[in-house]
Amino acid sequence: MSGKVIHAGTAIGCPHGGRAGAVPSASHDVLVDGLTAVSGTAVHTVTGCRRTVDGIPVPCTSVRWTPADGGVLLDGSPVLLDSTSGLCFTAGMVPQGPPVVTGSSHEGVSCG
């Protein structure tokens, strides 16, 4: 799998306009463009999702990633790439669609 490494400055959102923020592991000493690289163990919390069903709010609250095997490891967990598969979920763990990775003001590092 190839793509740009996701780091703490990468803009990630849900398909409904919410923003997902990564909480990288405190043990990570790997920096990309001066920002902490993010692995598959990072928790991504979604805020600002406006999704409703029949007028009832059902916002995305988290992103779960499915990193491919065989990639670069960070503390034993695969590094997330902008091409890594993932899904946004409600608080009740109902899938709501894939996250939107739009990049950042930094170029990042390519893996391929």
Image: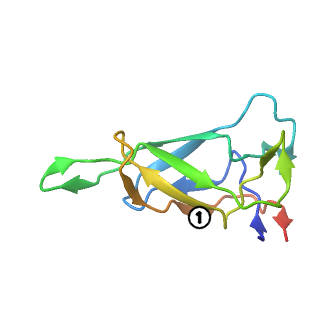
Side (left or right) of 104 relative to 30: left
Above-or-below relation of 58 to 4: above
Res. 32 in view: no
SS class of the residue under badge 1?
strand
Q: Residue furthest left?
A: 54
- Answer yes or no: is residue 64 visible: yes
Q: Quadrant of residue 66?
A: bottom right
- Label 1 is placed on what type of residue? Thr
Q: Which residue is mark 1?
A: 102
Q: Nearer the viewer, residue 110 or 79?
A: 79
Q: Where on the picture, by quarter, is residue 96? A: bottom left
Question: Where does residue 108 sit, x and y in percent of width and height?
Answer: 79, 60
Question: Considering the image in quadrants, where does the C terminus appear?
Answer: bottom right
Left/right of residue 110 with respect to residue 99 in the rendered view: right
User: Number of callouts in the render?
Assistant: 1
Could you tell me which quadrant the N terminus lies in? bottom right
Q: Position of residue 67 (x, y in %)?
A: 68, 57
Residue positioned 76% across, 28% down in the render: 26
Task: Say how the picture is coloured.
Answer: rainbow
Q: Nearer the viewer, residue 53 or 34?
A: 53
| Residue drawn at 84 percent across, 39 percent down | 75
Query: What is the crowding at mark 1: few (fewer than 14 residues within 10 Å), some, or many (at least 20)?
Result: few
Q: Residue 3's spot in the image, x, y percent?
A: 75, 69
Tell me where residue 28 sits by quadrant: top right
User: Residue, x 78% and y 71% (percent of image)?
Assistant: 2
Residue sticking out furthest to the front: 69
Relative image position of residue 97 (x, y in whole percent): 42, 62
Say which of 71 and 104 sits in front: 71
